[in-house]
Image (cartoon, rainbow, N blue to C red):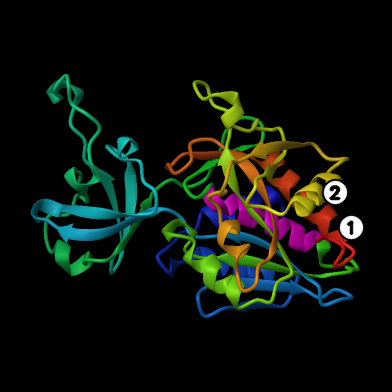
Amino acid sequence: MELKDTLFALTGADFLGGSGDAKNVIKEIASQYAPTEELKDGGIVATLKGKTDYTLLFEAHYDQIGFVVTEVLEGGFVRVGNAGGIDPRILPSTRVKIYGKEVVKGVFTSVPPHLKKEDETAPDLSCLSIDTGLTDNVSDIISLGDRVVFDAPPVMLGNDTVNAASLDDRAGCAALLWALENLSDKELAVTVKFLFADKEELGMRGAVTSAFNIELDEAVAVDVSFGDTPGVPSYQTGKMGGGAMICHSPALTKSVVDGLFEASKDLVVQPEVTGGRTGTDIDVISISRGGVKSGLVSVPQRNMHTPAETVRISDVKSVADVLINYALNHKGGAVK
């Protein structure tokens, strides 16, 4: 399956708060290349058995940000609370899908510029509502607790650029699936597990439980990081099209980080530096059980946590290539 097709399949499906089709897309693709199981917390694990029991984990999360219905109003309007890190500044006039008894299309209401006050600040989520266009029997279709996601199917921009609502972290999932496919017929010195975790956007809950259920020696998480954007300092971003971002952080294991760079010496990659925690699933995986040696590789992304997240396919492939080289060159137990 072409990487573009995988990205489109993953971002064309939704998954929030334990429900949606994206999980099934991942299971269908992963099971073509390795024995695959679903953990009781929703995590999906594909395993490539190596010559030794030394276990290397590659991880990405498949859930996305969104909302939950908190109130159904008269006139076809709905109020919601956030499920993940939402910036309310981007919400007015944004299209969404409500997963009620049937899928309902809606749009966040907005105030026309002609009616805005000069000193008006960005709206709070509690002040916004979703217009469904329904006039009758809204409560028969939409209930409290229903999930709401951005309605933004994937599209191609210029060059190899994909724009979609859930590339955080379906881009990471696509990199894992590409690595899984390309490692599936290789002889490996170590056992490699691929974990697709749920509920990262709700406090890394899935990575906590899934990692505990897997006996790990080492883990490399894959997520998205900030891509270069006009108006944002370059030291805070990675270059779009500049390849995988390999992270330096005091929260990571230096020998794993060094090993990732060594495995990437013939690839186009770029460094990233974070002070303290990385803000990704590796923060909790690294302290699972008695501790896990850890690394982090990221896809540069623009417009994070919006309906218009943007990545380069070449960067996703670069991340996958880093994982492939790292797994193929791993001797098992050598990284300490």
Report whether residue 31 is seen.
Answer: no
Quadrant in which residue 174 is drawn = bottom right
Q: Position of residue 312 (x, y in %)?
A: 64, 38
Q: Is residue 43 above or below residue 256?
A: below
Q: Position of residue 256 (x, y in %)?
A: 77, 54
Residue in the foreground of this view, choosing between 80 and 158: 80
Question: What residue range appears in magenta?
Answer: 168-182
Looking at the image, residue 332 sits to the left or right of residue 115; the answer is: right
Report if residue 311 lies within the magenta region: no
- The span from disc 2 to disc 1 (Cα, nearest Å) is 7 Å
Q: Position of residue 143 (x, y in %)?
A: 21, 67
Q: Which residue is mark 2?
A: 263
| Tag 2 near tag 1, CB within 8 Å | yes
Characterize the local packing of mark 2: few (<14), some (14-19) or many (20 or more) Cα atoms within 10 angstroms: many
Q: Which residue is mark 1?
A: 329
Quadrant housing the C terminus: bottom right
Looking at the image, residue 30 sits to the left or right of residue 198; the answer is: right
- Name the chief secondary structure element in magenta: helix
Residue type indicated by callout 2: Ala
Mark 1 lies on a secondary structure that is: helix
Report whether residue 268 is seen.
Answer: yes
Q: Position of residue 222 (x, y in %)?
A: 64, 53
Residue at 75% of width from left, 44% of height from top? 318
Quadrant in which residue 211 is drawn = bottom right
Looking at the image, residue 14 sits to the left or right of residue 138; the answer is: right
Q: Is residue 148 above or below residue 118?
A: below
Residue at 8% of width from left, 55% of height from top? 74
